[in-house]
Amino acid sequence: MTSQMFICLGLFVFLIGGYVFAKQLKTTNGVVALCAIILTAWSGLVDPKQVLGNFANANVLLITGMFIVSAGFNRTQAVKKLSNLVLKIAGGNFTVMMAGYLLVTFLLSNLIPSPVAVFTILSPMLAASCEAAGVSPSKAMFAMGLVVVGTCGVLPVGSGAVMFATQNGYLESYAYTDYTMQLLDPFKGRILSAIIIILYAIFIAPKTSPDQPTNPIEGSTAKGRGAAEKEALPPTQEFLGYFLFALTTLGLVFASKLGLANWQVAMTGAVLELVLGVLTPKEATQAVPFQIVLMLIAALSVGGAMVACGLGDLIGNGLASALGGTRNGYVIGAAFFIIPFVLTQFMQNQSVQNIFIPIVILTCKSLGCNPVGPLVLLQAACLTAFLTPSATATVPLMMGAGGYDQKDLLKMGWLPSLIICVVSVICTMTLIPAF
């Protein structure tokens, strides 16, 4: 390992350790994140301009825009009405209520190619329903986050409908065209684990979640109930609150077909909320959880440092060497699930996937085995990303909405992670064998 890799490793330890012990150090996750951002800029691992650019990262802008759009929706009476409707249908049964929300979550996670957008759309409604049922949102938000991230892209629609073409492009780029991925291969490999994730989220996750938030609840979910208790908006603004929320959601669903970026859709919706008077500038500012935004920027900065210094490549190449000449498909599949799964807890999952795609293809090429199953498992591993706030942009949002700290994430997340790993490897490598 080079000196830069050791520095980068130290940054990771500082970031995660700071999140774990923030309360004991009488500080906040936001302060820890800001320190990590500054240390990344000073470390020399990445250009300070790149660190600065993370403040305008597409996910950061998407989160900011969607919080404002969600706040506009919460400012209407819709959250109160919808939460009461869900409770009425559920008959006051918390488990039935969770089942309804999580099935909708699964559907949207496969239509909208952004777990962040799905979570910010649905979490305020879930929070309001929980409060109306006399249950803390801390009992429900991890379950929603688990489904949002873990089942993304399973169905052959939306982003799931283009994965096979993307992977085939990589196979062609690395001159390994003996095998090709079919449209339904990701579905075949991941549908069983998706079903198990949904059932786990409905029946088990609420039992492993804290009864009350460990940290104060942040973001628009904290304001869901209060927004409904404010003076009602004028009829025109009430309608615009509904309209802009629906228009933004549809915009995210069809963004790729319209040639638009997700952040562009979300920020346009946010601006219109202000211009058309659904929200005041003060309400819009209060809707953005800046601590969560800083945690995301820190993850982007430190993750970028890991890519830049080659620490991610070092770990990935070590895996390729360790596999040697094995012909056991389950061993190959497990390797390409476990190592990316571990890495994605400390790097943004898309970065891990980008690092490992060539490693998976080249390793399988040298072994003469089918790379389709390992590529499907790589995607599954990178979406089993809910143990740390560095894993994916959705996790800091989930932490804010549920009032969780790092210890809560580890307590709630270790069992579903283990289940997903075992089920994914066995199912995928059985249905799409390596040899």
Image (tube, helix red, strand yellow):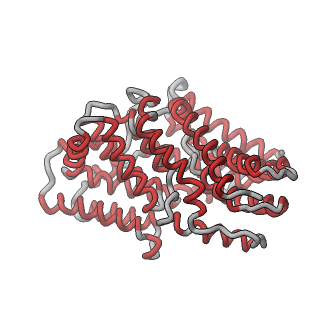
Q: Is residue 163 above or below residue 309?
A: below
Query: Where is the N terminus found, in terms of image quarters?
Result: top right
**Is residue 85 found left or right of 137 in the rendered image?**
left
Residue drawn at x 77%, y 42% is 6
Residue drawn at x 35%, y 66% is 250
Q: Nearer the viewer, residue 100 or 172?
A: 100
Total labels drawn: 0
Q: Residue furthest top?
A: 24
**Is residue 372 found left or right of 125 in the rendered image?**
right
Residue 118, quarter of picture: bottom left
Query: Where is the C terminus found, in terms of image quarters?
Result: bottom right
Q: Position of residue 199 (x, y in %)?
A: 45, 41
Q: Position of residue 424 (x, y in %)?
A: 61, 48
Q: Nearer the viewer, residue 389 or 284?
A: 389
Residue drawn at x 46%, y 29% is 208
Q: Is residue 164 above or below residue 278?
A: below
Residue drawn at x 34%, y 48% is 287
Q: Nearer the viewer, residue 299 or 114?
A: 114
Q: Residue furthest bottom?
A: 258
Q: Position of residue 280 (x, y in %)?
A: 25, 54
Q: Residue furthest left?
A: 235
Q: Could one spot residue 61 in this view of the protein? A: no
**Is residue 223 found left or right of 317 in the rendered image?**
left
Q: Nearer the viewer, residue 153 or 300?
A: 153
Q: Could one spot residue 185 in this view of the protein? A: yes
Residue 206, quarter of picture: top left
Q: Position of residue 10 (x, y in %)?
A: 71, 38
